[in-house]
Every structure is written in C-alpha cells, then in structure tokens.
Amino acid sequence: MPHWAIVVAHGDAESSRYYIHSELEGTESEALAALLNTVDASQKASRARSIKHQRRQVFRVSERSYFLRVMYRGYSSQAHFTLAELVADTHDDDLPDTVGGSTEGP
C-alpha cells in the first residue's frame, strides 16, 4: 500500500519552513481526500465574528498541491500544502534506497 505525507511550507520563498503535517497509507484517492480535508480545516476562523472579517483563499497549484492565503485585519498568513508519495526508503525492503532505483554497482 502506498505511503503518503502531507507536506506544509510556511513563510516566504526565502525563508520557508517545511514540515510533515501527517502521514498515511492508502490509495491515491484516499490521500488526495486527506490533503483536501487538511487544506479546508487549516486556519479557519472559529468564531462567527472572526469569520465575518477573515478572508481565506485557496489556490490549486497542481492536482497534489494547494496554496492557502488567510487575511484578517492587517494579518496575512500563507501556507503551501503538497501531497508527497514515499518512493525511496533505506529501511523498507519493498522500496529502493534511492530515487534512481538500485544502489547495486554494475
């Protein structure tokens, strides 16, 4: 079963911080649904008064990537959410050690 990570980048292009928000195993459609739920839940105002003054914009960058901008009374926050599939792992016998495939010599 494929292994996925929802990767989030916060900050400006020059000083972005990346972290893994969550990991899951499942089909691509299940992982995409989890990505959309994460984006939809991120930085939503919780009080009716705040909702009235908060503006959230979601931009689709690609099928697996969304950019979220939240603006609230002089405050602005951005986050880039990306769905990533695990394709190499040195501790998983089912996956290669490198992206290029085998680490064996010629």
Image (cartoon, rainbow, N blue to C red):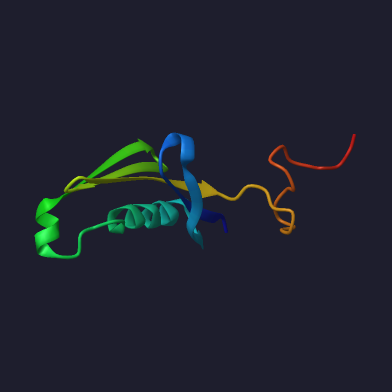
Q: Nearer the viewer, residue 17 or 65?
A: 17
Q: Residue at x 39, y 53 (%)?
A: 35
Q: Residue furthest right?
A: 106
Q: Residue at x 74, y 54 (%)?
A: 90
Quadrant of the image occupied by residue 13: top left
Rendering coords of residue 15 (x, y %):
47, 40
Q: Quadrant of the N terminus?
A: bottom right
Rendering coords of residue 83 (x, y %):
46, 48
Please state if 64 lies on the left or on the right of 95 as rendered: left
Rendering coords of residue 87 (x, y %):
63, 47
Please state if 10 lies on the left or on the right of 2 as rendered: left
Height in image: 19 above or below 67? below
Please state if 85 lies on the left or on the right of 100 as rendered: left
Q: Nearer the viewer, residue 47 or 82?
A: 47
Rendering coords of residue 50 (x, y %):
14, 59
Please state if 51 lies on the left or on the right of 2 as rendered: left
Height in image: 60 above or below 43? above
